[in-house]
Image: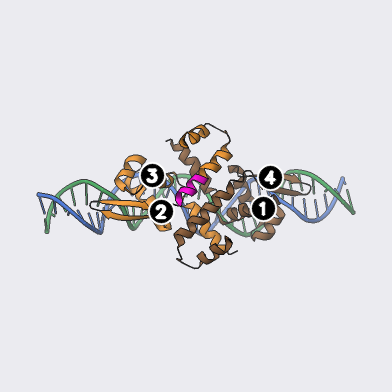
Chain colours: A orange, B brown, C green, D blue
Amino acid sequence: MSVPLYQAKAEMFRMLSHPVRIRVLELLQAGPRPVRDLLAEIDVEPSNLSQQLAVLRRTGVVVSFRDGPLVMYALSTPDVADLLAAGRRILGAVLADRDGLLAELNQERR
Amino acid sequence: MSVPLYQAKAEMFRMLSHPVRIRVLELLQAGPRPVRDLLAEIDVEPSNLSQQLAVLRRTGVVVSFRDGPLVMYALSTPDVADLLAAGRRILGAVLADRDGLLAELNQERR
DNA sequence: ATGCGAGTTGACGACTTCTGCAATTCGGGA
DNA sequence: TCCCGAATTGCAGAAGTCGTCAACTCGCAT
């Protein structure tokens, strides 16, 4: 098994290793959204959000296009949902009530 | 939705964002293994492997115990397989033949 | 052409992660 | 008890990541 393959897998997961980026992907699961909306929901500086969006674009999980005055972002594949779901499941197994976050996690799965 | 929850999710994925750590988790899917074996299969310095194992231990996805002269590692939850599988699927969608890694990825899924 | 709102890019300092080396711990044999 | 293999820890330098500020680009309306 080649080292580059593992490198690619690692980069795939690294792409997800940031709160803002996860949040963005979760929001995009509901469909394409303008940066404007993301900015309204995420509480982060515009330039910072742009940086994180650039990371997502570089790895290819999202695409961007212009719609009039707004820039829109969309998932490039719906498989992202599986990844996030799997992450949630493990988090649940691993936290195993280690602290209050578990309750909040479960609520989200309603 | 709280910031700490997203932080926890991000840390979950960060834990996976390293070639050696991914490799270890893949190997452990087949069952518990001594450090000795991992070391034989991964081509990494013992101290480096130990560091990466420590990361996995800290986040709680693996547990370690002693068996005679050897230290064994095992997955703490089988859910890890889902995460890795989801990662593979996205990698496939995203790479979309961008380079030769895709063929290797598919072969692995046999 | 000028101005404006919407995003992006570049660059800097603060901080974290990674790796290899050396030193250390820990359990069994001899 | 002493030693040896197995694994971990501490540490230092190199490399990467994060957040913020300022400057910039782009499309559109005036």
Q: Which of B67 and B85 is in front in this view?
A: B85
Q: Is residue B61 left or right of residue B95?
A: right
N-terminal of the pair, mark 4 or mark 1, is 1
- Residue at the far bottom in the pictured view: B100
- What residue type is disc 2 on? Leu
Please give the chain letter of the residue carrying mark 3. A
Label 2: element kind: helix
On the question of residue A62 being in view, the answer is: yes
* Res. A43 in view: no
Q: Position of residue A43 (x, y in %)?
A: 35, 40
Question: Residue under circle 1?
Answer: B30
Mark 3 or 2 closer to N-term? 3
Q: Position of residue B5 (x, y in %)?
A: 47, 38
- Labels 3, 2: one chain: yes
Residue density around tag 3, few if under 14, some if 14–19, many if 20 or more, within 10 Å: some
- Which residue is the site of mark 2? A56
What stretch of residues is rendered in magenta? A77-86
Q: Are marks 2 and 4 in contact (CB under 8 Å)?
A: no
Position of residue D8 measured from the top left corner of the image (x, y, whole percent) = 67, 47
Q: Is residue B75 above or below residue B92?
A: above
Spatial CA distance of label 2 from label 4 is 35 Å
Distance between mark 4 and mark 1 Cα atoms:
15 Å
Does mark 1 fall on the same chain as mark 2?
no
Q: What number is the disc on residue A27?
A: 3
Do the numbered discs 3 and 2 sit on residues whose CB atoms are within 8 Å? no
- The reply, left or right, for residue A32 in relation to residue A102 is left
The residue at 67%/47% (across/down) is: B74
Q: How far apart are marks 3 and 2 (CA)?
A: 13 Å
The CA span between labels 1 and 3 is 35 Å
Q: Which amino acid does label 1 sit on?
A: Ala
In the image, are marks 2 and 4 on the same chain?
no
Mark 4 touching mark 3, by CB under 8 A? no
